[in-house]
């Protein structure tokens, strides 16, 4: 089965011991949540998910050439 290419960008402390930007080849039907889980990122720590600069959800399937950005919850106060 053909695979698709996506770019994953991590922000803030999600980059620690991981990467800043990664080109990935994934199976069709792979969701945003599948990527988050594969990176061992706790879904509770995710604050914002974006595909091509638009807000998205864990359930959204990725498509060819998508750019997925994963931001942690912002603390403080």
Image (tube, rainbow, N blue to C red):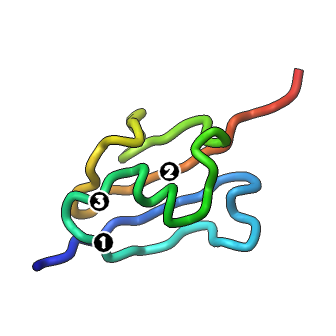
The residues tagged by marks 3 and 1 sit, at their Cα atoms, a distance apart of: 7 Å
Q: How many other residues sit within 10 Å of disc 3, few (<14), some (14-19) or many (≥20)?
A: some
Cα–Cα span, label 1 and label 2: 16 Å
Please tell me whether mark 1 sits on a helix, a strand or a loop: strand
Horizontal side of residue 51 vs 27, given as left or right: right
Which residue occupies 62% across, 67% down?
20
Q: Quadrant of residue 50?
A: top left
Relative to 42, 76 lies left or right: right
The front one of 27 and 23 is: 27
* Image coords of residue 60 (percent x, y): 30, 43
Q: Which residue is mark 2?
A: 69
Residue highlighted by disc 1: 26
Residue 11: x percent and y percent? 65, 53
**Considering depth in this image, is 28 or 76 the residue closer to the camera?**
28
Front residue of 1 and 25: 1
- Sequence-first disc among 2 and 3: 3
Q: Earlier in the sequence, mark 1 or mark 2?
A: 1
Q: Quadrant of the N terminus?
A: bottom left
The span from disc 2 to disc 3 (Cα, nearest Å) is 15 Å
Residue name at image x 20 percent, y 76 percent: 3
Q: For the residues labelled 2 and 3, say whether their Cβ atoms are less than 8 Å apart.
A: no
Judged from the image, the secondary structure of the residue bearing numbered disc 3 is: loop
Label 2 CA crowd tier, 10 Å (few <14, some 14–19, many 20+): many
Task: Mark 3 and mark 1 in contact? Answer it, CB < 8 Å.
Answer: yes
Position of 56 with respect to 71 (left or right) is left
- Residue 30, which numbered label? 3
Name the residue at 61% across, 45% down: 71
Task: Answer above or below: position of 4 versus 33.
Answer: below
Q: Look at the image and tell me in which quarter the C terminus lies.
A: top right
């Amino acid at each position: 089965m053909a695979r698709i290419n996506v770019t994953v960008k991590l922000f803030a402390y999600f980059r620690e011991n991981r990467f800043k930007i990664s080109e990935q080849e994934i199976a069709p039907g792979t969701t945003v949540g599948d990527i988050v889980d594969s990176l061992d990122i706790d879904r509770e720590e995710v604050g914002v998910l974006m595909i091509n600069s638009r807000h998205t959800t864990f359930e959204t399937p990725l498509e060819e050439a998508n750019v997925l950005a994963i931001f942690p919850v912002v603390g403080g106060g």
